[in-house]
Amino acid sequence: MRRGMVFTVCLAVLVALCCVGVSAQETLNVIYMAQAGYQPDDIRDMADLFESLTDTKVNITFVKYDEQHEKIVASAIAPVATYDVILLDLIWTAEFASKKMVIPLDDKITPDMRKDIAPAIMGAFEFDGNTWAMPFLANFQLFFYNMDMIKKAGFSAPPKTLEEMVEQMKAMKAKNIVQYPWTDSWNQKEGLVCEFVWLTGAFGGDTFDEKGKPIFNDGPGVKALEFMVSLLKEGLASPKCLTNDEDAAKDDFISGNAAFTTNWTFQYALMNDPAVSKVVGAGEMGLIPVAKSQAGKAETASVSGFQGAAIMANSRKKDLAWKYVKYITSPLVQRSYLQEMPVWNSVQESAYANMMDKTMDVKSKQIAAVHHRPKVPPYPEVSSILQRYIHQALQMKMEPKAALDKAAEEINAVLARK
C-alpha cells in the first residue's frame, strides 16, 4: 500500500480542497522519527502528493526517536523555527504546552473531527484546557510470536498468560529450538519505560497514579521488574535486550532468533515482508499475555505510544503547517496506509479497513487495554531516572525493589520542585 495506491485520486481531491490558497514555491520543514510507526517511505509518499498538489516543498528530517526531543527543543528556542511541523509524543504534551513551544489547535479541530476520535487518543494531547497536537498515530504494543517454534516445543497455541509463556520458553530451550526465546528493547532509553509500563499493567497495576505520582515501587511494579530480571537470570531473555532498541528487537524476531517479543504496531508489516523477514508464515500477532493472577480481571495489557502532529509556536508558516497537518492526519490518508492503526473510529470500523487488515479486531482489543505514562511537564527527567534504576536492576546491580524505591524517591523530589 505504497505508491500507486487505490486512493490516490481521492487524496488528490482532498488535498486540493484543504489546501486552497497555498502560495507557490513555499517550503515547509518537518521532523519525523525513523523508528516505530509509519516508516520513512510512507511519510515521504504522503509528502510527495502534498507537494505535487500545492507546489509546496516539504523537507523532512528523519531522526531516531531518542534524538527528536532535543532537536525540537532547539528549534523552539531559535529565532526562526528549524521545523514547522513536529511529531509530538504524548509524553511531551505537558512540557511543550507549558513552555508554549507549540500552538493550541482548538480553533482548527472541529467538533465532528473530535467525535470521530476516541477520547483516550484525543485526550493524550490535551493539557491545561487546550489541545496541542492533532492525533496522527495510534501507536501501542502488541504480542508477536513464532508459531512454528511453539509447535516444535509441543504446544498447540500461543500463551495466554505470562506463566504459560515462561513454560513454553523453557521447553524451547530444553529442545534447543532457540537459544533465547525472548527479545525486547530494554536499553536505557524511553522504550525501557514502555516495556515496564505494560508489564506492570500485566500484573494488575499502573506505574503512576492519576495525579502523576509514582506508585511503581509497590505490588505490580515490583513484580513486573522481578519478572524481567528472572527472564535474564534463567537465560530466557537474550542479553542483547539490554542494548536493543525497538528496531533491534524487531530484527531479532524477524530473523528467527526469538520466539516471543512485544513491539509497536509497525512490526506486523515488516514481519510479513518477504524482502526482510525470515518468519513469513510463522510469525503471528496477538494480544499481550497477562499474569495468571489477572485471570478473570483482564485479558491483556499494553502501553500507549500515541503520536500527534503539532505546529511550532515560532513557525512563520502556521497556516500552511496546519494544511499539511490536516492532510497527513486525514481519514483518507490513514485509510490508505493501514499498516498502522488509524486514529479515526470511522476508519477503524469501516468494511474496507477490516477487509484489508484482518488484524483490526486484535488491534481494537489491544488498544482498549493500554496503560499510560504520566502527563507531567518534567517527564524527560522523570523518565531518565526510571530508566536508570530499572536498567541497574536488569544488570543485577540492584535488587528490583530497592531500585524502584530509589527511583520513586528521586522522581518525587523532581516533581516537588516543579
Image: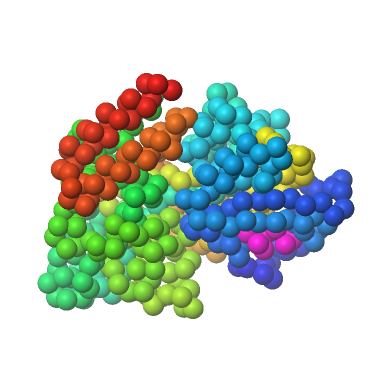
User: Is residue 150 or residue 245 the one in the foreground?
Assistant: 245
Residue at x 27%, y 48% (from the top left corner) = 391
Q: Position of residue 210 (x, y in %)?
A: 38, 26
Left or right, 367 with respect to 118, comes to left
Q: Is residue 21 above or below residue 42?
A: above
Q: Is residue 401 visible?
A: yes
x, y percent for residue 61:
62, 56
- Front residue (pair 124, 383): 383
371 in relation to 329, above or below = above
Give percent across and percent down for residue 35.
49, 58
Report the quarter where the N terminus lies.
Answer: bottom right
Which color mode does the image show?
rainbow
Does 262 appear above or below 94? Answer: below
Q: Residue 343: tell me if it is visible.
A: no
Residue 177 picture quarter: bottom left
Residue 171 left/right relative to 46: left
Please name the residue shown 80% across and 48% down the image.
19
Residue drawn 46% across and 46% down?
305
* In the foreground, 230 or 293: 230
- Which of the pair 189/173 is nearer the observer? 189
Is 119 contained in the magenta span?
Answer: no
Residue 106 is left or right of residue 163, and the answer is right
Q: 132 above or below 261?
A: above
Question: Which quarter shows the C terminus?
Answer: top left
Answer with left or right where residue 245 lies relative to residue 241.
right
Magenta highlight range: 43-49
Please give the count of numbered marks on the rendered protein: 0
Provide residue 160's location: percent of width, then percent of height. Answer: 25, 55
Q: Main secondary structure of the magenta part?
A: helix
| Residue at 21 percent of width and 72 percent of height | 179
